[in-house]
Amino acid sequence: MSRKSKEEERHPSEISDWEGNQDAFYKKIFLGSPLLRGMIADRLGWQAEDLADMDPHTTEFQSRAVSDAFHGQNPWKGLRSDGIYKSAGGFALGIEFQSTPNHGMPIRVQVYKTAYLEEHPDFPSEDLKFVVVYSGSGRGVAGDKHGEVRREEIEYLYLDLNKIPAEQLEADGPYGLVMRLTRPDAIDIGQFHLAEDMIKSADISELEQNNLFTALVVAASNKPRVFAEVLERFQMNNAVRRSLVEALPRLRTMAEGQMMRDRLSSTAVRREWPDEVLTLIEYVHDDDLDDLDDRIRNAEKSEDWTDLIEQAQEFASAGPGFR
């Protein structure tokens, strides 16, 4: 059974364009949700109205500290962050999205914070906060710690969209509804039509409307039952549309594999399989999922998980790539 290659973990080239844009469009609309702004303000001790008036602070970093930390060959490490926003009150918020568990996320947050403070040495470090938002299936990087400020490696607020009642997001206007549709359980085409109508009737700029429609289509991209209709029907960023159309065959294959991973992951949690099995479910190659399913069934029957645990430990020691 093979492990997914580094290239596959970073996604195939034909979908890299839209994959790179995916988080950017979610970040653009995330703070438009009054519900999510309120949750962030409450946990971080800020005012919700301050979060309603934040400007994107896209920054090109040249960090010596990060290069040194990773033993880079160049004296400076080039980084680009499109998820840091500044308020009129002077504080800054970094937003990172996850659709699959990425246990390197605290490292990424540390890298961005280090680079940002190096670029802006007079900015108070306590006024730069981060929120990590998880929308995938199974357990995210912080497990069941939704709504908590994590402080193990670096301080960040962890929000799991799956733990927020769906009806609250659906009643939160177009921004909250689109964020709700990023969840894996959003497979009803009627919800996407509702979001379309809500976006069209909202009192927002054409740019904001386009951002919402694009995020809506991207949210459907891993849902085979609704994606084709959403992609054909809804208006969106044309460059992202072209990338999605070109990547459609590969996306369908990935979606089928993801659906199987979701099924196995949810079963693993429900039946309390060893944590190492979740590692295998996440990282094995799509072509090996059927074989893994058979091996899990045999292990469960025999109550002997030894081989699977050993293989998971081999995968973990190889070091998962950033996804």
Image (cartoon, rainbow, N blue to C red):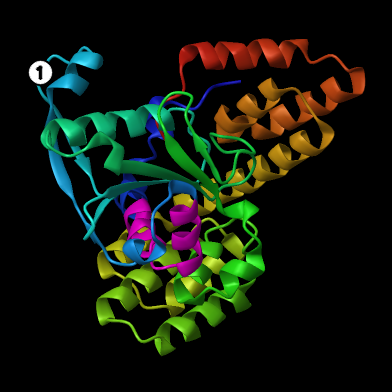
Q: Left of 126 or right of it: where is 104?
A: right
**67 over 180 or under it: above or below:** above
Range shown magenta: 22-42
Magenta segment: does it hold 225? no
Secondary element type, mark 1: loop
- Report the amino acid beneath label 1: Asn
Outermost residue on the left side: it is: 75
Image quarter where the C terminus lies is: top left
* Residue 35 lies in the magenta-colored region: yes
Q: Position of residue 188 (x, y in %)?
A: 64, 71
Q: Main secondary structure of the magenta part?
A: helix
> Is residue 91 shown to the viewer in this render?
yes
Q: Report x, y in % for residue 30.
A: 40, 61
* Quadrant of the image containing the N terminus: top right
Q: Is residue 181 visible?
A: no
Q: Quadrant of residue 232?
A: bottom left
